């Protein structure tokens, strides 16, 4: 009897060991095939200013210094981690309820420091000096300064990576890429003659437009247009009315927003502009600047709006 009990016990032990081995092997296999969608901290990334930035831990307290950055954070479901934004951050509605740390170039640095952020998302241009100051104060800061839609998509994925939201970022950019493809699928085969000449007005006093190496220029091209100031030497040049008249755009597009801007009707009544084809053919349009000039998730809304204006025959359905 004793021998039978011992044999049964040995069988139980043997089976248990085999089961533990099988379970361990299955877990190891699952870990091996499981997609790596979330970053492991600490991690090192490079921002749009070419800076190498170390992210020591997953950020829990984030400050945004630009409306586009704020929109990216909310799109990645990180609204609860945002502790402060600028006074221009008005989308989505919950952004307006956040603590304010100034405008765009007049950031209250003392307030930023006092809030003890784990991460600050800035931009380039006038904020480059702010980035340097934050760096000097040992505050982790990443600058996003996209020049085209491809870089906007990359920045969304970068924010996803440094905040532990890689999966959400990948889902968002995949959706954006699909929407881009639907548009470019209709515009990529247009002939040179079919690509209409576009004048985009950034500001009216003084007159300013978008040159190359800007996402607005990129949007015009993707939408099937030709930027008449593609040869500009700087991103956002000042221009004179005579040059616009000489280049004779077939479509004029202006943006209106919180800072104002010229309306389509005001543009049509400018002295001498009745000689421009766009005005003669009543092809002067307005687009909400927030969907066209913020390098964030809604930029695809801007691209879709631009495409429908330039080529309504392709996007009427």
Image: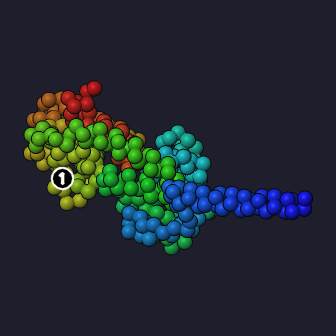
Image quadrant assignment for residue 146 = bottom left
Q: Which is nearer the eye, 294 or 78?
A: 78
Q: Position of residue 125 (x, y in %)?
A: 36, 61
Q: Which is nearer the eye, 268 or 163?
A: 163
Whether residue 5 sits left or right of residue 153 in the image: it is right
* Residue in view at x 42 percent, y 70 percent: 51
Residue extending furthest toward the bottom:
136
Q: Secondary structure at mark 1?
A: loop
Q: Which is nearer the eye, 57 or 39?
A: 39
Q: Is residue 161 visible?
A: yes
Q: Position of residue 301 (x, y in %)?
A: 36, 39
Whether residue 152 sits left or right of residue 20 in the image: it is left
Callout 1 environment at 10 Å: few (<14), some (14 to 19), or many (20+)? some
Q: Position of residue 15 (x, y in %)?
A: 72, 58
* Residue in view at x 37 percent, y 58 percent: 145
Would you name the residue on which mark 1 appears?
230
Q: Assign the N terminus to one quadrant of the image.
A: bottom right
Q: Is residue 99 visible?
A: no
Q: Position of residue 187 (x, y in %)?
A: 21, 40
* Residue in view at x 49 percent, y 64 percent: 141
Whether residue 6 sits left or right of residue 264 in the image: it is right
* Location of residue 68 with respect to 105 vertically, above or below: above
* Residue in view at x 27 percent, y 46 percent: 219
Image quadrant assignment for residue 28 = bottom right
Residue extending furthest toward the top:
317
Whether residue 111 sits left or right of residue 160 in the image: it is right
The image shows a total of numbered marks equal to 1
Q: Assign the C terminus to one quadrant of the image.
A: top left
């Amino acid at each position: 009897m004793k021998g039978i009990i011992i044999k049964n016990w040995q069988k139980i032990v043997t089976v248990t060991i085999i089961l533990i081995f099988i379970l361990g092997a299955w877990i190891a296999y699952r870990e091996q095939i499981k997609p790596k969608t979330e970053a492991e901290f600490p991690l090192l990334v490079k921002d749009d200013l070419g800076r190498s930035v170390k992210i020591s831990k997953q950020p829990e307290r984030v400050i945004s210094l630009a409306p586009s950055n704020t929109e990216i954070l909310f799109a990645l479901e990180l609204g609860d981690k945002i502790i402060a934004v600028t006074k221009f951050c008005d989308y989505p509605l919950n952004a307006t309820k956040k603590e304010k740390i100034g405008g765009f170039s007049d950031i209250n640095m003392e307030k930023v420091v006092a809030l003890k952020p784990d991460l600050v998302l800035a931009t380039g241009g006038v904020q480059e000096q702010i980035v340097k100051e934050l760096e000097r104060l040992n505050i982790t800061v990443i600058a996003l300064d996209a020049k085209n839609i491809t870089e906007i998509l990359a920045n969304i994925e970068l924010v996803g990576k440094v905040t532990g939201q890689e999966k959400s970022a990948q889902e968002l950019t995949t959706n954006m890429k699909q929407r881009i493809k639907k548009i470019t699928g209709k515009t990529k085969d247009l002939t040179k003659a079919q690509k209409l000449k576009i004048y985009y007005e950034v500001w009216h006093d003084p007159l300013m437009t978008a040159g190359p190496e800007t996402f607005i220029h990129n949007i015009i091209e993707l939408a099937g247009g030709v930027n008449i100031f593609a040869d500009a030497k700087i991103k956002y040049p000042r221009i004179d009315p005579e040059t616009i008249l000489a280049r004779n755009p077939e479509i004029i597009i202006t943006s209106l927003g919180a800072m104002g801007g010229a309306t389509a009707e005001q543009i049509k009544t400018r002295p001498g502009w009745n000689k421009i084809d766009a005005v003669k053919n009543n092809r002067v349009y307005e687009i909400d600047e927030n969907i066209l000039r913020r390098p964030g998730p809604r930029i695809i809304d801007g691209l879709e709006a631009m495409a429908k204006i330039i080529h309504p025959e392709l996007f009427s359905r």
